[in-house]
Every structure is written in C-alpha cells, then in structure tokens.
Amino acid sequence: MKKVVVAVGGSSGAIYAKVLFDRLVQLQDQWSAVGVVMSPNARFNWKFELEQEDYGEYPFDFYEKNDFMAPFASGSARYDTMIVCPCSMGLLGRIAAGISNDLTTRAADVVLKERRRLILVPRDTPYSLIHLDNMRQITLAGGIICPASPSFYSKPRDFEALAATVVDRVLDLAGFELDSYRWGERG
C-alpha cells in the first residue's frame, strides 16, 4: 500500500489535478494514505478553470500550505511517492534549489533526501534555459520530470480523457497498477 503526497501547484492546469484525484479514488485499493497540499493559486485555478470547488470532497487528507506538522514533512512518516501536478516553474525552481519555505517544498526536499520517488508535472511552455537547468538539477537529484504533454494516439474523446493521457503516465511512473492505453497492445 502506497503513501502518496500530492501537491497541486499554482500554474494553470487544474484539469490534471482533478483527473489525478479521480484516478487515485479509482485506485484506492493500492494506497493507504494520500496527503494533499494545494496552494492558494491552485484553489483559485480549480475554481476558475473547472468552475467548481469540489476538491475538498475527495477522500484524502488535506493540509495547509504552511502546516509543517503534516506527517510527510518528515522522512520518518515514510511516504514513498510525491506528485506535484501541475508544477509551476517557480515551484520547480524552489525545489531544485532546496528551498523548503512551505509544506510542498519541504515534502519534496524530504522525498529527495530519503531517495524516494518525486514526480513533477510542469505545465508551462515554452521553457527558458533557467527552467531546463532546474529540471536537470531535479533529475540529477533523483526526481522525475513528466511534462504535461498529452498524447493523441489513444484518440481521447474529451478534455478529461486528454488530461488522463498525462495522468496515467504519471501514475505508471509512481508504480500504480492501472488499465490505460498501451502502445502496440490491443485491448
């Protein structure tokens, strides 16, 4: 059973966070805890982009941005995976620099120092050299950069299915067992 931290950063792309939450609910037999941190901008984007505020209705443990008493603020809690989805370039830069000034960056720092799985899903485009250098730094530290670049070969039928092409890839990287489109496999 996995213990997962999900941080929802403040960049555009709330649909990715929503689909990730939905998929985690579908996979609840594979996790024992999901801790969620949403920045104020993440909450704003959820409301603005999705025209709803139902994120609090998911069966996860929600923590405030500066709640350093959250279990995953320490490596002793043994959360094995952290997913930052979507991840703004500012947040990515703070993680790359080891700046632990809030719960999200502290949790990412903990995951990296404990040699556990950190997956960042940047949505911004294009990338500057600073962004690429920060992504390189995180990769060298053991993190995984999985850009929110949807695929089209599964012929997604709607907006959520398109976002799911990214989210399913993230969940694969996190080690979850799920049914999703697999290139070259007939379903």
Image (spheres, rainbow, N blue to C red):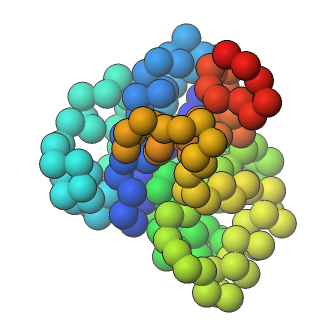
Q: Quadrant of the N terminus?
A: top right
To which quarter of the image does residue 144 belong?
bottom right
Residue 5 in view of the camera: no
Residue at the farthest top position: 29
Tell me which residue sits at (60%, 80%) in the image: 127
Residue 62 versus residue 100 in the image, above or below: above
User: Where in the figure is residue 97, as x and y percent of width and height?
Assistant: 65, 76
Image x and y of residue 181, in percent = 64, 29
Quadrant for the C terminus in the image: top right
Q: Quadrant of residue 126?
A: bottom right
Q: From this view, report whether residue 3 is shown above or below residue 122.
A: above
Q: Is residue 108 left or right of residue 9?
A: right
Question: Residue at the spot x=36%, y=63% of the render?
Answer: 12
Name which residue lies at 16% across and 48% down: 51
- At 68% from the left edge and 88% from the top edge, which residue is drawn? 129
Q: Above or below — where is 148 with respect to 132?
A: above
Residue 106: x and y, percent?
55, 58
User: Which quadrant holds residue 56?
Assistant: top left
Q: Is residue 115 visible?
A: yes
Q: Is residue 90 left or right of residue 143?
A: left
**Height in image: 16 above or below 175?**
below
Q: Which residue is the extreme one toward the right?
A: 140
Q: Nearer the viewer, residue 3 or 173?
A: 173
How many numbered dots are placed on residues in this image?
0
Percent x, y for residue 68?
A: 45, 52
